[in-house]
Image (cartoon, grey):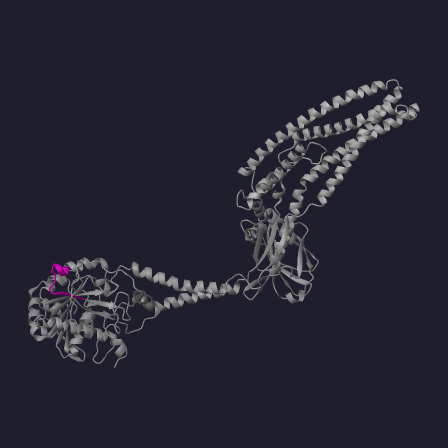
Amino acid sequence: MVEKKTPAGKPADDFIRIQDLWSMFVPKWYWFAVCLFITLAIAVLYLLSTPPIYTRTAAILVKDNSKSSSSTSSMSDFSDLGIFKSNTNINNELLTLKSPTLMTEVVSRLGLNETFTVRRGLKKVDLYKAAPFTVTFRDQPEAPLSFTIEFSSKDTFTISDLKVSDESTGETFSAQMGDSIRTSAGTMILHPAQKNANAFIDTPIQYVRGSVSAAADTYANTLVAELGSDDATIINLSISDASIRKAEDLLNTLIEVYNENWIQDKNQIAVSTSQFISDRLGVIENELGHVDENIAGYKSEHLLPDVQAASSLYMAQSAENNKELSALNNQLSTAQYIRRELNTKQLNQTLPTNSGIVSANIETQISEYNNLVLDRNRLIANSSEKNPLVKNMASSLQSMQRTIIQSVDNLIVSLNTQIRSLRRVEDATTTRLASNPNQAKYLLSVERQQKVKEELYLYLLQKREENELSQAFTAYNTRLITAPRGSMFPTAPRKMNILLVAFAVGLLVPAVIIFMKENMNTKVRGRKDLQNLSIPFIGEIPQYSGTKKKWWELKHRRRQDLKTVVVNEGNRNIINEAFRVLRSNMDFMINKDSNQHVFVLTSFNPGSGKSFLAINIAMSFAIKKKKVLVIDGDLRHRTASSYVDSPDKGLSNYLNNQVENWKEIIVPYKEYANLHILPIGTVPPNPTELLENNKLATLIAALRPEYDYIFIDCPPVDIVADAQIIEKWADRTIFIVRSGLLDRSMLPELENMYTEKRFKNLSMILNGTEGAGGRYGYRYGYHYGYASYYGDKEK
């Protein structure tokens, strides 16, 4: 017997040791086995059904055009030192490469919104550029559609499982290559591809056509674009797909489309300038034609000779003046046109360059204005006009527009002043020519107009040619550094990682469940939960499992067989050794006072195993040739009486004076003549009143000299008062604590019973512990050494 001296209020040691966890998990090993089997099976099934994913990467160098601008040249010297460094341009290009607009063009060119797949084992294989047919629609369907096609021969096939917008139409078609097939989604035609169709005979091929925008969004989200380093303009592009060829084609086409859009964007200024020059050439060509017709008609009408020789001196001077005046008029006309364009142009439209204005300041301002317009348009394409950067650019454009207007106005005033001055000089020359015939004067005026318009016409032709050349020689914004490439080994799924995760989950899930279940359990779990009680501890009895339960009967594993006597002479299994230890502790306790050999067994809960323990403890003493009596004191259930088949006469009949001699109701237990049982007999309607009868005290007094040990099986103390009544005539009280049945919140009440001495010589037995050991109990066969020495076999 173990005497408990630990104060009841001392907190328990909740520190979890490795041994505790091991003892907690090992008995539930089958949980881990089942979970590992499930998780690993799911992982293997996932690996077998998931197609391998390959990654392809490419690198492009984005040219930094901002360094050629005079506005940033002064800052470029500091960029190498990390001062005034700006990655705005390269970040814009990153966003452009990932934009759905760019990816939409890529999807349209490669037809990535259409997929052809076949099943190989558990996997679906993408037949990119390897399908035996192509599909064309007379009317392009807007809704997504899919169908399954199976070839019975090279040119004959059957279409089934047609779905439009994920809804089955129930249509089935049999046709040949080139036939027009009318479906609810529209008329479609299948054309043979330059592939070996014989390889796909009797192999179902699934065709899926989705929207271009949805496919573009998917690939845009899959695409990874990132800088090679913070101070470089190299962009690394990578994408993952089940088809290596598709991934490489996608990256190549993306770079191609990006360069084309860049050229188109950059040529907007040249296109605007070309339109301006073409418009002006049309006007001047028309005016020049009228002047030519006027001169020819006038000379023909008046039969005029060449009058230039007659007034060569004056004409030379006039020609010089006209040349200067023509140049000034040309500049004035261009400046006025630019002035009108500034009033009508929107902020997203560029201004013509190389227009002939001799003012370098205005040309520079127009060039900077156009560059800012293009940057704003590109930023709007990837965001919106509400972007703070867009608003700042709009404000800058308006400011620059006002500056250009002011400069052009100043230029117009200056040109008008020069023209008026030249005209005054020309008027003087004309006056000196007044002596010539009026016809010469008229022709001179008309020829002057002709020359001005000829010079302007030739000038615009030259500018148009220069503008066309500038468009033809516009360079790409990027240079391919590394062509799409990658490993031939798949990057996903990672088999070892998935198996390791499945293995970890298979271990973690049952461990967490067991741990939570253990820590949420409010019942007494084992010896450790009783360490803080000061009640003398006699011993513990492991869970009896004489008949193995199937897994669906495990919930009943704590129910002892009512008529089971597990103690047998010569049997050295764990439970027999536990009862021997218990018997030794009781002998030690009784030896202190040999007269105290009447025991009451009670508990808080029904089903604690009182009758089972009473019979088997009595049997353990009977094996030692002691005369033992078990009294069934539970007049309501007569559980102990069932060990002798519940005879009709017993304790209740004796207390009711229906039986005079108590020896008549004593029943020997089978082959053990020194083990007797006093059954209840008839279940009385008033058990409490019978127990309060003095005949019970007389009976116990009469039995004391007849038996070495007397064990009285009583009802639970919290249900009826029978145990308290019977306890008055007993010497000792054994309180049965059933592991997994008694709530730990009742332990303080049990401690109070002991400290307040409500029961005589109170001690306790822990019943129903796990025989293989646990975190809260002691292992039989390890701590006691019985199992390791004797084993579980009967000897």
Is the residue 217 above or below the residue 409 in the image? below
Residue situated in front as seen by the camera: 558 or 592: 592
Segment colored magenta: 753-764
Give the x, y percent position of residue 148: 60, 59
Report if residue 633 is visible in the image. no
Which residue is found at the position 6% from the left and 65% from the top? 694
Residue situated in front as seen by the camera: 364 or 628: 364
Q: Is residue 326 magenta?
A: no
Q: Quadrant of the C terminus?
A: bottom left
Which residue is found at the position 32% from the left and 67% from the top? 22
Give the x, y percent position of residue 384: 56, 39
Q: Which quarter of the picture shows residue 414?
A: top right
How many circles with numbers are drawn on the protein? 0
Give the x, y percent position of residue 320: 81, 27
Residue situated in front as seen by the camera: 303 or 725: 303
Is the residue 504 above or below the residue 214 in the image? below
Report if residue 654 is visible in the image. yes
Left or right placement of residue 107 versus residue 275 in this view: left
Left or right placement of residue 218 versus residue 315 in this view: left
Q: Quadrant of the N terminus?
A: bottom left
Which residue is found at the position 79% from the left and 33% from the top? 457
